[in-house]
Amino acid sequence: MAEYRPQLGAEEASADIDMTGKTAIVTGGSAGLGIETIRVLAKQGAKAVSVVRNLEKGQNAINSILESVPGADIDLVQLDLFDLESVKKGADVIAAKYPKIDLLINNAGIMAAPLSRTREGLDAHLGTNFLGHFVLTARLIDNVIAAAPARIINLTSSAHRLSPLRFDDPFFEKEEYNKLAAYGQSKTAAVLFTIALDKRFRDRNVRATSVHPGLINTELGRYFSEEEMEFLQDGIPEGVEMKDVSQGAATTVWAATTPEFDKLAGQFCEDCAVADRITDPDEDGRGVLPHALDEQAAERLWQLAQEWSGQTFRD
């Protein structure tokens, strides 16, 4: 059984590891977990690049970080993960400015949003939470390899339990749209992406892992009605508690700083531990289901992602 540490805060999870000289790219740096992740990494000495959709909001977040970490070295880059042309443009700005990227943290995401579609036809969840990060990672992979040993961390969720990858109808073109299934599928996709990514680049000393931050009341839940939020909180499994933002960012920071990252690579992590593997989606507590760790599904999704986006990774 994993030794979960749900009460650990982000600063404690960093274990005072010196990140001086490291460059960390963090998407979703204008809210919640992204702000806290950047704050702690910057406090440990890293150069942090906050990737945001809204520049004003992103700058306000940086200003708030500077109040608690004077002198923090933080840059700001704009891109919209929903728009692949914006992703490509923003990624190329990052790639030109930072030839070596030690940490790529694909943190941004949306949850339970109403149905909308990307230019490629994907629903917003699969497009934003997965495909946008797929393209961003592909366009930065040379820079990550140049910094090897380097790490890629993909944010996922226990919501992967809500849906495997819907290969027969990934965009809800046949069945009625279900926002929770759409969100769950996108979080399964994040884990599958991690598995395929780690497999491809481990020989180049670039490793990847996926992390579930836990249940946190952040802007991510803005599409839930008050009644839906009450329903979700009533359904929290026994032994799993709501976290504050620092506790929510802890697993990401732990994965970003631990000297034993190879033990996490290709895995699903939560509460600062590699999660146990479970088989029942209704099982209380923690754990990751087999459909999120299926290597064949990971390969199938990888190929589809290249078709959907027109973006390939280097050989």
Image: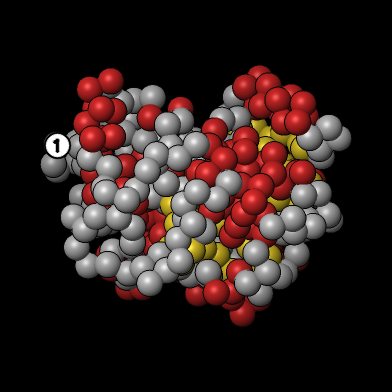
Q: Residue furthest left?
A: 175
Look at 78% across and 35% down and name the residue there: 69
Residue 243, position as x, y percentages in the image = 45, 40
Left or right of 231? Residue 213 is right
Q: Amino acid at mark 1?
A: Glu
Pick the residue in front: 153 or 258: 258
Pick the residue in front: 86 or 49: 49
* Structural crowding at the residue carrying mark 1, measured as other residues with C-alpha within 10 Å and reported as few (<14), some (14–19) or many (≥20): few
Residue 20, position as x, y percentages in the image = 83, 54
Residue 77, position as x, y percentages in the image = 69, 35
Residue 36 appears anywhere in the view: yes
Q: Is residue 314 above or below residue 73?
A: below
Q: Considering the image in quadrants, where does the C terminus appear?
A: bottom right
Left or right of 115? Residue 274 is right
Look at 50% across and 44% down and name the residue there: 248
Element under disc 1: loop
Residue 85, position as x, y percentages in the image = 55, 38
Residue 89 appears anywhere in the view: no
List the residue tagged with mark 1: 176
Q: Considering the image in quadrants, where does the N terminus appear?
A: bottom left
